[in-house]
Image (tube, rainbow, N blue to C red):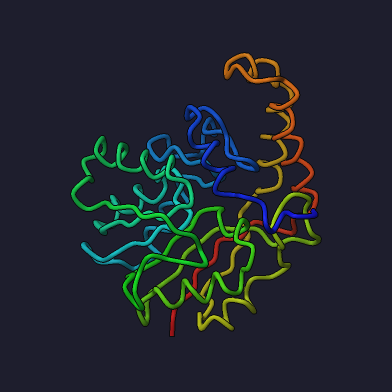
Amino acid sequence: MTGAADRDWAAVFGDVFAEPIRRCMPGSSPRSSARTSAEAAPDSFTSRSELARIANEVRLAPGGLLLDVGCGRGGPGLWVAAATGASYLGVDIAPSALAQVHDRARRAGLADRVRTDAGAFGDLPLGDGEAGAVMSIDALLFAPRKQAALREVSRALRPGGRLVLTTWDYSRQPEGRPPQVADHRPLLKTAGLRVLAYDETPDWEHRQRETTRLLMAFVNELAAESGSDPDATRAQPAEAAATIDTMLRRVLIVAQRA
C-alpha cells in the first residue's frame, strides 16, 4: 500500500477515460450487466433501480443544482439530472472524462443545463451552499482524506440539502488504494451531515466477484480487443479481486446537511 495515498490518480483516471468506453475503470464493473441502465453507461456497479432511488432521494426540484463528484463520463449523473429536471455540474479529476460528459449531454438533449469543472472531493469548484444536492457513485474510495472530503461536500451543499452516494466500508486496508474506513457514519456526522439511510447493496459481493471472474476468464480476448499486453490486462481484475477480500459492504448513503 506504500505510496497509494499519494498516487497520481488524475493521471491514472485520465488514461482510463481516454480509452474507448469498453474499458473498465480499475475496480469497477463492465457495462454489460443486465441490471444496469444501458443509457447511463456507468463505470461503476450502479444499477437502474439504484439510479431511480438516487433520483428520488436527492429531493431536487427542476432547475436545482445537482453536483456529481467523481462524475467520470457522467452517465449516472446525467441519468439522475434527466429524471429530476435538475441542472447538472459534473466534477472530476480527469479532463478526458469531462469532455465525454458534454458529448453525452448533447446526445441526450441536456446540453443547455449541463456544465463540468475540474475538481476533487477535497477541493470543489463551488461556493458555500451552492449545490442543491450532491451525488457520487463509487468514487469516494479514491479520496485520500475522507473526513476532509466530506467536510468539503457539506460546505458546498445548501442547508437542508442532501448527499446521496455509494461507496464501500472496509475490514482492512486494500493494497494500492488510499486509506479506507470501516464505517463512514462517524465521518458524516463530524462533517455536519445527518445520516438518513445507510443501506448495504443487495448481492454486491457476488456480483463483484462474478465480474472479476469473467474478466479474468476472458483476459486474452480483452487484451486482443484493446491491443494491450495480456499481463497488463490481467492486472486490473486481479487487483480488483484482491480488493474485494478487504471489503465489508457496499453501501448507499443518504445524508442531509443541517
In this rendering, the answer to whether 14 lies above or below 49 is: above
Residue at 50% x, 29% y is 19
Residue 103 location (% of width, % of height) = 30, 37
Residue at 55% x, 69% y is 149
Residue 70 location (% of width, % of height) = 48, 54
Residue at 51% x, 83% y is 192
Examine the image and state in which quarter residue 53 appears.
Answer: bottom left
Residue 199 location (% of width, % of height) = 59, 64
Examine the image and state in which quarter residue 197 appears.
Answer: bottom right
Q: Tag count in the figure?
A: 0
Residue 257 location (% of width, % of height) = 44, 80
Examine the image and state in which quarter residue 163 appears.
Answer: bottom left
Q: Is residue 102 left or right of residue 238?
A: left
Q: Which of the two residues, 101 or 202, is positioned nearer the viewer here?
A: 101
Residue lying at the far left in this picture: please name it. Answer: 112
Q: Is residue 92 left or right of residue 3?
A: left
Q: Is residue 203 left or right of residue 33?
A: right
Q: Is residue 206 left or right of residue 147?
A: right
**Position of the C terminus by quadrant:** bottom left
Q: Which of the two residues, 71 or 170, is positioned nearer the viewer here?
A: 71
Residue at 70% x, 47% y is 205
